[in-house]
Amino acid sequence: MDPINLIINALIERGGIWGIIASMLFFWNIHKENNISKKEKKTEESIKETHDLLKIQQESADKKERHLRSKIDELEKHIISLQEENKKLLKDIGNLEEARVDDLKDLLSEYHTTATNTLQALEKFEFFITNNRSSRS
């Protein structure tokens, strides 16, 4: 005879009303334990699902962070190369400005020479004109 039939037989047939109450309490307790165990199992599964979901989200966040970090590193390298290029360009601009200043100095020197020569020529013309008038008179 199996144990459940033995318990039912002992409680109901031999125990009378108290046996029936005891068997009801016994089976009610078994029922409650089954429900509690089902709820615990559902809770454990829910916790496991939540844990797995959080793990997936963390992995996704880590992947995004690595991707963003690599983008930031690339941008930093690009910025550094642009800064170096700007330094070179500023140096070239400085050299060009110096060359322009030298060109302007040369132009001013030539202008001054030309103006001086023109002034001397005008003075000679004036001298000749003055001398020619005085010699004609």
Image (cartoon, grey):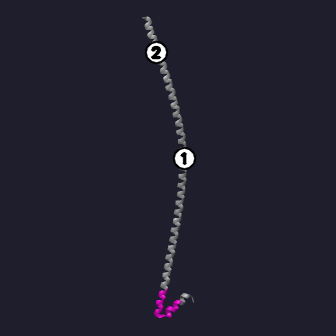
Residue located 55% across and 57% down the image: 66
Sooner in the amino-acid sequence: mark 1 or mark 2: 1
Residue found farthest to the right: 1
| Residue 48 shown in magenta | no
* Residue 92 picture location, percent across and down: 54, 37
- Residue annotated with mark 2: 123
Report the number of discs: 2
Start and end of the magenta stretch? 7-26
* Residue 21 picture location, percent across and down: 46, 90
- Residue annotated with mark 1: 80
Label 2's element? helix
Residue 109 to residue 27: above or below = above
Quadrant occupied by the N terminus:
bottom right
Q: Are marks 1 and 2 in contact (CB under 8 Å)?
A: no
Q: Amino acid at mark 1?
A: Ile
Residue located 56% across and 88% down the image: 3
